[in-house]
Image (tube, helix red, strand yellow):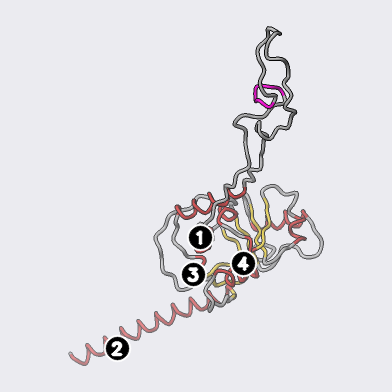
Amino acid sequence: MHCKSRSSIKVKTLEINIKNKSGNSTKNLTLDPSVWNLELNEDLLHQSIYVYLANQRQWTKSTKTRSNVKYANQKLRPQKGSGRARVGSRRSPLMVGGGVAHGPLPKNIRKSLNKKMKIKALKIALSAKFNDKELNVIDQSPIKDNPSTKIINDYIKNLDLKGSILFVTPDNDKVLIKSCENINNVEVIEASSLNAYTLIRPKNLVISVDAVEKIHDLWGEPNFKTVSKSATSSKKATTAKKTTKAKTTKAKTTAKKKVVKKDD
């Protein structure tokens, strides 16, 4: 995903379409601006991803040095008389079966990041997905009863998604995980396990309404309430506002004309 830089914009309410299994938008969902409308900070994103990837390394490779190799202290051959070169310890790295010189050893390379920085990086990644129009909100889980790869493939076609996909669920959805195992570039993750790297990596983010509410509960404003409105009602409300504005402007112009006529 290529994050586009943008200036911070203060938005009172954010809305996104909720899609059903056929890919049609039925309702609008209000999103918490404190989670989905943060300014892009590439330095913080880079730092969070760097720490996450560094902590994925085990670094448990180990070799035995000459002090770890166990052999008897018996001299291999006499020091003099054979005409051959003198031989020291059998533990020497020069000997076959001896210790390893400058070999890899276990290290503790774990890096840490402030909790507030982790959460902010996560919110920035979510905001980038929303602003780049790579966020898809669905009304419910694509599959419930039995695992089926065909149903998930049809679901992806109906949503018209191209590229890698990440399904976000409110809890551990084993049926959905089993259904997506044999599909390339499709992964499933629980909402509470999200981080900046898992969000930036895929092209498309498909998240259910319940998972959005879970994200709001975990990292959003405490008093924010997620409200879903029908798309038709929101359109009617906008048209009603436009008509009322037009009526008020007409009334003002007619009143001004009457005042001008009286003065004449």
Report the residue marked by disc 2. Answer: 255
- Looking at the image, residue 229 sits to the left or right of residue 38; the answer is right
- Considering only order in the chain, which callout, 4 or 2, is on the residue closer to the N terminus? 4
* Secondary structure found at label 1: loop
Percent coordinates x, y for residue 178 in the rendering: 77, 56
Report the residue marked by disc 1. Answer: 114
Report the residue marked by disc 3. Answer: 33
Badge nearest the viewer, 3 or 2: 3
User: Residue at 54% across / 76% down in the picture?
Assistant: 222
Report the residue marked by disc 4. Answer: 25
C-alpha span from label 2 to label 1: 62 Å
- Quadrant in which the C terminus is drawn: bottom left
C-alpha span from label 3 to label 2: 41 Å
Seen from the viewer's position, the closer of residues 170 and 264 is: 170
Disc 2 crowd rating (10 Å Cα; few below 14, some 14-19, many 20+) is: few
- Considering only order in the chain, which callout, 1 or 4, is on the residue closer to the N terminus? 4
Callout 2, which amino acid?
A: Ala
C-alpha span from label 2 to label 4: 43 Å
Callout 1, which amino acid?
A: Asn
- Considering only order in the chain, which callout, 2 or 3, is on the residue closer to the N terminus? 3
Disc 4 crowd rating (10 Å Cα; few below 14, some 14-19, many 20+) is: some
User: Residue at 61% across / 29% down in the picture?
Assistant: 101
Q: What residue span does the magenta drawing correspond to?
A: 91-96
